[in-house]
Amino acid sequence: MSTPVQLPGAHPQFFSRLRLQLPTLPEALASMLRTVVVAMFLLTFVLQPLLIPSESMEHTLLVGDFLLFNKQVFAPKGNLGRWVLPYREVGRGDIIVFHHPSPPLLVKRVVGIPGDHLRIEDGRVMVNGVVLDEPYAAFEPAPPNPFRDNFPAKIYTDPQVDPDWWRQMQGLTTDGELVVPAGQYFVLGDNRNHSKDSRFWGFVSREAIVARPLVIYFSLSRPSTTDLHQATLQASDDRLGHDRQLSTRLAGFARWKRIFRVVK
């Protein structure tokens, strides 16, 4: 006859108390509902996920980065949440998420705020006569483009420039500098030679700005078409690679060191 197994020192009433502590079905449903409500509040008013699809913000943001962005920090006037959560005005150097006709959402960095006198000389941004300190800016190899590298240009040279923006720009240029109007912001991608930004289609209005990237919560290893080193690595990986170990493939699946990196 087998002998029942009993934990040392455990009294039979211990197990009855343990059963009594388990939540009832209504309690479990209420707890789940609270979790859902909190998650919906965060996603609706505070945080929202975003995937980076292009190289325009390298090397601050890479293709394959998954972001959580703060939808409250730049909340417009009248938004209830701005009285509850931290809020501030958009500043020079901020990375912003904003509405745009195509694609619907873009991520760029603010380099010009209302009232700024701005120009670009050989790719370097000058605001109010001072060269901006931009440690985040990258200048990956690209064919020369006088319109892109020296702005505002006097001659219409790039077919990718929005014609309406070109005409507007002429009326806002004084002594070779673009004057940023009230309620408007001039934005650039950090990857300056591979970004379609305010140089090509104009300002971002304050009403269009919806959020600020907060943290990278995951990052898939995706090759960049503008990074020659990455392109070479991708070409060498096109072989079947039977000699590669499973651990190596798993390690290369994601950029683990970028996870939970704060976006600056």
Image (cartoon, helix red, strand yellow):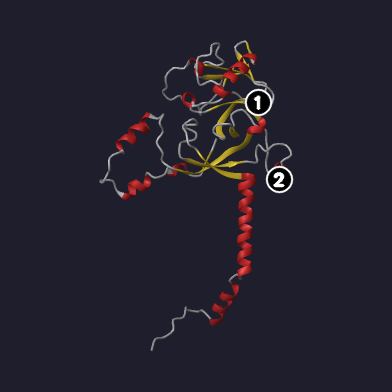
Q: Name the residue that disc number 1 marks.
A: 184
Q: Is residue 65 visible?
A: yes
Residue ID at (67%, 41%): 86
Is residue 172 positioned above or below 196 on the image?
above
User: How many C-alpha atoms fall within 10 Å of the one at disc 1: few (<14), some, or many (≥20)?
Assistant: some
Determine the secondary structure under disc 2: loop
Locate residue 249, reporting x and y percent.
Answer: 34, 46
Locate residue 124, reporting x and y percent.
Answer: 52, 19
Q: Is residue 128 visible?
A: no
Image quadrant of residue 225?
Answer: top left
For the N terminus, give its image quadrant. Answer: bottom left
Residue 102 relative to residue 221: left or right: right
For the C terminus, give its image quadrant. Answer: top right
Which of the two discs, 1 and 2, labels the residue nearer the N terminus? 2
User: How many C-alpha atoms fall within 10 Å of the one at disc 2: few (<14), some, or many (≥20)?
Assistant: few
Locate residue 131, reporting x and y percent.
Answer: 56, 19
Is residue 45 positioned above or below 7 on the image?
above
| Dot 1 and dot 2 residues touching (CB under 8 Å) | no
The residue closer to the viewer here, 132 or 197, is: 197
Q: Name the residue that disc number 2 marks.
A: 84
Determine the secondary structure under disc 1: strand
Residue ID at (57%, 15%): 152
Nearer to us of marks 1 and 2 is 1
- Looking at the rendered structure, the kind of residue marked 2 is Val
The residue closer to the viewer here, 63 or 263, is: 63
Is residue 207 positioned above or below 13 on the image?
above
Residue 248 relative to residue 163: left or right: left
Locate residue 105, reporting x and y percent.
Answer: 57, 35
- Looking at the rendered structure, the kind of residue marked 1 is Gln
Could you tell me how far apart the alpha carbons at marks 1 and 2 are, in whole angstroms?
A: 26 Å
Residue 210 relative to residue 241: left or right: right
